Amino acid sequence: MSAEKHIRLLSDTVINQIAAGEVVERPASVLKELIENAVDAGATQVDVELVDGGRRKLVVTDNGRGMNRDDALLSIERHATSKIRAADDLVRIGTLGFRGEALAAIASVSRFTLTTRTAEDEAGTEILIDGGRFREVREAGCPVGTSIEVRRLFYNVPARKKFLRAPATELNHARQCFLVHALSRPEVGMTLKVDEKESFRLPAGDDMLHRIGALYGTSLLPSLKPVSLRMHGLKIGGFAADPTVHRRGRGDQLFVVNGRPAAAPLVYHALNRAYGDLIPKGRHAIVFLFLEIDPALVDVNVHPTKREVRFRNGAEVRDLVIEAVREGLRGSGSGADGAKAS
Ligand code: ADP
Ligand code: MG
């Protein structure tokens, strides 16, 4: 038997890059994490900038509470979070983030600049990181809030860079991510700039319908039926489009659970049931649904991307969605405009 050791602990840089594989798949996943952080920081304005589909440059700027120098330095460490303290907190998560992984992961696979300031501090802090290697921290003049710039995603991980698609495809994913967050928080002002050109400017304090109109075109609004139902402590609201409008994919089916845009196979199932034969086979309804539920009944920690949620009472949620959408579609039929007036 040889006494030589074969097992080594990995360096933090390598650990972060491995973790990045789970959290960061493409520019859209970076965007998702940064928008979530902005919302968690209480921002009322979030500005997004993409160059080359986010591959060359992706910037998210918010007017949230910002970070002081010490917090800023901690924020890019793995497993550093201000959002939970103990495993117990996982059963009642009120923030979008909680794993403390995103910034460390993103910074390990890009050229990363964090600029931030709190209202209490006169000077802000700027931190530069290159592929997970700390470069510089300095004072910076900047407004209250946080701006994170991510350049050349995966420049130091060729194996992953290969999997990035054409700029137009990456842009589509990123735009979809922007859309979903813009819809899930109509009260937050958001802008999207694509290759130096403004493509959306959504005012703060929007209501849902106005925002849907701004994102999808106002011609959709008359087709939308309000959905609203309470059952067994669950609450569901939102809009379901008349079955005469439908799409090829599920891209226009938004499902938000306690403020978190979520994928839940059970809901797709429920929507198929609710619309039944009203929609041609292979087509999908347009639906914007907001579910409020006791956080203890939802598991959001299913996957590192936190995209999928699971329900403790899945059957109840499914039935509520079916019932709510059916009722909405049966409704007086005056469309969303009429509903607003009533
Ligand atoms: P998580 O969101 O899971 O806590 P992140 O790696 O995304 O993990 O962020 C780490 C920490 O950095 C957050 O808990 C938060 O305290 C801070 N942070 C990140 N982004 C922002 C932001 N835009 N504004 C203020 N604080 C932020
Ligand atoms: Mg986060």
Image: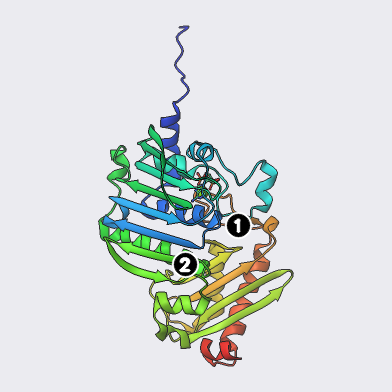
Tell me the residue at 52%/74% (across/down): 288
Tell me the residue at 50%/55% (across/down): 38
Left or right: residue 32 compared with residue 26: right
Give the SS element for disc 1: strand
**Can you tell which of label 1 and label 2 is closer to the viewer?**
2
Q: Is residue 14 above or below residue 167?
A: above
Tell me the residue at 30%/37% (across/down): 156
Q: Is mark 2 within 8 Å of ligand 1?
A: no
Left or right: residue 321 compared with residue 107: right
Give residue 213's quadrant in the image: bottom left
Q: Is residue 309 above or below residue 148?
A: below
Task: Give the residue type that dot 2 points to.
Answer: Gly
Give residue 81's quadrant in the image: top right
Q: Is residue 285 visible?
A: no
Q: Is mark 1 within 8 Å of ligand 1?
A: no
Q: Which mark is residue 310?
A: 1
Q: Quadrant of the C terminus?
A: bottom right
Give the SS element for disc 2: strand
Task: Give the residue type that dot 1 points to.
Answer: Arg
- Frontmost residue, 77 versus 120: 120
Q: Is residue 331 above or below residue 14?
A: below
Q: Report the coloring of the rendering.
A: rainbow
**Residue 234: x percent and y percent?**
69, 69
Q: Is residue 128 visible?
A: yes
**Residue 146: x percent and y percent?**
46, 50
- Frontmost residue, 97 versus 166: 97
How many marks on residues?
2
Q: Which residue is mark 2?
A: 189
